[in-house]
Image (tube, rainbow, N blue to C red):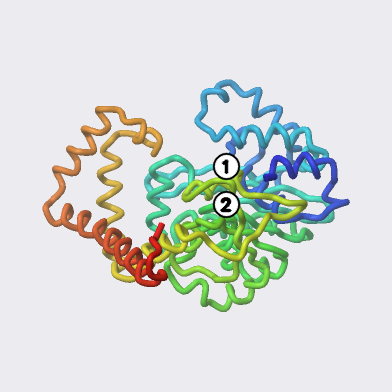
Amino acid sequence: MSNLFDYLTWRGDLSFGNASLCPVDALIFSMLAYMDFDGIVPREAGAQPVRLSEAARAYFARPGVAEKRIDANHEKLLRILAQSGRFGSLRMLGARKVLDRADGMQFGAISFLLPGQNVFVAFEGTDDTLVGWKEDFRMSYECPVPAQLRAAEYLREVAEAHPLRRIFVGGHSKGGNLAMFSAVNAGEHVRYRIRAVYNNDGPGFCDSTIAGIAYQEMRDRIYTYLPQSSIVAVLLEHDTNYKIVKSTNKGLLQHDGYSWEVQGNDFVYTKERTAFGKRTEAVVDHFVSVTSPERRRRFCEALFGILEASEQDTVSGILGGKRQSLRNIMGAYADLPDEVRTLLTETIAVLGVGQRAQKEKERLALPKGEKSS
């Protein structure tokens, strides 16, 4: 099946003046937000912009690019876009990358000036850092988290720097959540200029954001896309107004936007989520319903306290399995007070109970003689 790379082969020569922004374009901008254009694209929203083709040339000429840990698909995408008539001439500005360990914030954003007095604001999803992953966990009991506040501030900056432009906002994963939060919280003077918000498999909220007046005002302009087996977009309080996208991957790997199926200028949709997606959603819902925000906070602090003892800054570094890192993790766990170890064990057990309960529910619902997968 076709994906966003095939879309670029088919549609890459059409300018935005000849073919307007579509959901696949919004996903492309959202994936570009993961890339680091520091020193290439200006940080300021009102600065002189840089053409995408020029930014790509400078990016690949930068020393050490080959050694950086980045998804190969991101670089493949940038190379193709730079040669594309549709994207190569677009102007970029406001490139931000912030990793604040003291505040516990991982944030990234970039903006694209489109023809017809439009601007697309794209927010980065979770990167590989422990800081980023911990902030994701914080979203289960705290709202707003630092990245959400920074996103609303960033959107206001772009709106003020380009007062005559219509605004489109988007992001993938946590970036989708930031897109929604920023649009809802940037202020009425910004909201009325927003034409669409694209949430690509981003999580919901732990508070009453969805039920708020500002969100309801924006609701018809928020477009949420999630793959069949998604567990991210159905976390916490989320809107049911979404479209289900087919993916060439299985299970959790469907979160990867590069695996989403594309036909023409849109995604390929289906009416049903997979059994895996429904089951996992039920387990997570059970976990949230039986654990208080305070317990989730304590669990997060304890879990990441152990992981940070590995002396690794990234998830991939920990999963690399270095012996010293593993010894440090085990030592940190052993040194925890008894009540904290009990908290970790009991909280993880809640997920296990939820999984067993959901499987039993599915078993009882099956016709006699059939087995649950």
Q: Splitting the image into 4 quarters, where does residue 245 fall?
A: bottom right
Q: Splitting the image into 4 quarters, where does residue 292 fall?
A: bottom left
Secondary structure found at label 2 = strand
Q: Residues within 10 Å of mark 1 (few under 14, many from 20)?
A: many
Q: Is residue 288 among what the camera can see?
A: no
Q: Residue furthest right?
A: 18
Q: Quadrant of the C terminus?
A: bottom left
Report the residue at 40% width, 45% height from top.
Answer: 131
Q: Is residue 180 among what the camera can see?
A: yes
Tag 2–tag 1 contact (CB < 8 Å): yes
Q: Position of residue 247 (x, y in %)?
A: 59, 50
Numbered circle sitting on residue 19: none
**In the image: residue 117, left or right of residue 268:** right
**In the image: residue 222, left or right of residue 348:** right
Going from N to C along the chain, the mark reached first, 2 or 1, is: 1
| 2 or 1: mark nearer the eye | 2
Q: Residue furthest front?
A: 369
**Residue position for label 2:** 172
Report the residue at 59% width, 46% height from top.
Answer: 248
**Residue position for label 1:** 34
Q: Position of residue 330 (x, y in %)?
A: 20, 38
Q: Position of residue 195 (x, y in %)?
A: 72, 65
Report the residue at 67% width, 55% height from top.
Answer: 268
Front residue of 263/344: it is 263
Q: Quadrant of the N terminus?
A: top right
**Residue type pointed to by label 2:** His
**In the image: residue 93, left or right of residue 327:** right
Report the residue at 52% width, 50% height from top.
Answer: 255
The CA distance from mark 2 to mark 1 is: 9 Å
**Residue type pointed to by label 1:** Tyr
